[in-house]
Amino acid sequence: MSVKIAYQKTCRICQSTRVVKILTLPQMPLTDEYVTDKTFGKEFLADIDIYFCEDCQTVQTLHNADLSAYYDTYHYSVAASKIASQFMEYVAASVLKTYFDNAPGLKVLEVGSGDGEQLRFFKEKGCRVLGYEPSAPLVKKAEEKGVPSIQGLFDSSSISKLPADFKKADIILLSYTFDHLPEPFKFLEAVSSILDPQTGLLVIEVHDLEKLLSRREYCLLEHEHTIYLTRATAQMVMEKAGLTVIDFDLIPESVRRANSLIFIATPKSSRFSSRKTPKVQLEQYNRLSFYTEQADKIKEGIKNLDAFIEKTVRAGKSVAGYGAGGRAIMTLAATSSAGKMKYLIDKKLKGEGIYSPKSHLPVYGLDHLKKSPVDEVIVFSYGYMKEILEDCLPLGYSAAQFKSVIDVMAGKWN
């Protein structure tokens, strides 16, 4: 895929020129551009440079990739996962009960609505729903579920495309979408214009930079992502946009997905603004030296993963990976030994005869673990470990053969 990249020199949040590069992941692919025999070796690859703004302390990229064609055929979905569905149902139930006492008829708009799975739960609870999604295949799936959706990338011009009854929304959702936006404030200005000023809620889920760094999850540093938020920078960004963060704890940690920061913001004119969260203090995250230390730990994590694969293969054992989504794609793309693995397994196979970009591992369905057994399995989708073991142990494996990629990168495999 041909992707045009434009570079900027100023911070996405405060426009400061005091942005410092803290890490480079060389020649990385897109997370969902699987290759075939015909496209093998022709996939998009480019460096991912990560920067720290010394003025507003936001971590970000400074390259803007034109991904309109990429998103048009995007297929990623977690609807097949029981854990993901339970999580989405919990989100809908908690928001509606906590803030609206389950009042019927609320208007819920989701930007980056995927296959409509999250909106489906709001609809089942009596809400009127509308999705906005760039992927044609996912819009089709959403429509099949009875979730009306508009196809396209959401920007300031999208407001005019909304039906009249959605010119004012009670709840606007973004699940792993806000951190994809090249211009966060233009987006916030647009959605603020349709968010009910008295009771409107903006519910945002992004990848949590605090967790990302503590777990060395460099796989979440992607071309598709533009900003990486902590609780403190989330508060700062919302305040700059005229919104107030009122909740970081709506969803218990035990229920959340693997790397999830969920927060709720409301207009400062809203009756909910009195619930403003106390200012989060994360002093170490304000220092450039902290990020250089974290970059070194990420590099160490890559070395640990390479060492595990190398050691296992030298011992005459075989290694496969479970999960062929973004975590596996990006994790393996930064290693030097991924090619020594046998294959990747994905429960919801995205096609036949496909390979992971850059690492070029064949991707198979779940039954391949039985057809072609391996000795060790690195679990990239570690947040679903319980569900994965339930699927795989009946195939003749033991739990000890499955190792979380987080543990492997931390060196906890000796």
Image: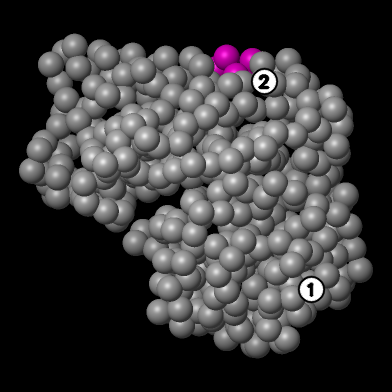
> What sort of colour scheme is used for the picture?
one colour
Picture mark count: 2
Task: Specify few, some or many for label 1: CA neighbours under 10 Å numbering under 14, 14-19, or 20 or more.
Answer: some
* 2 or 1: tag closer to the N-terminus: 2
Q: Is residue 363 magenta?
A: no
In the rendering, which numbered label is found on residue 179?
A: none
Q: Which residue is mark 2?
A: 22
Q: Say which element carries label 1.
A: loop
**Image quarter of the C terminus:** top left
Could you tell me residue 35's position as x and y percent?
32, 42
Q: Can I make out residue 382 in this image?
A: no
Residue 410 to residue 6: above or below: above
Estimate the spatial distance between the alpha carbons at disc 2 and disc 1, rounded to whole Å.
Answer: 37 Å
- The residue depicted at 14 percent of the width and 50 percent of the height is 367
For the residue marked with disc 1, what is the amino acid? Ile
| Residue farthest toward the left in the current orientation of the protein | 371
For the residue marked with disc 2, what is the amino acid? Ile
**Image quarter of the N terminus:** top left
- Indicate left or right for 169 with 152 as reference: right
Depth check: give the residue in front, 354 or 335: 354
Task: Specify few, some or many for label 2: CA neighbours under 10 Å numbering under 14, 14-19, or 20 or more.
Answer: some
Our reading of the magenta stretch's main secondary structure is: helix
Q: Can I make out residue 324 in this image?
A: yes
Could you tell me residue 295's position as x and y percent?
60, 19
Residue 252 to residue 326: above or below: below
Residue bounds of the magenta highlight? 293-297
Q: Which residue is mark 1?
A: 194
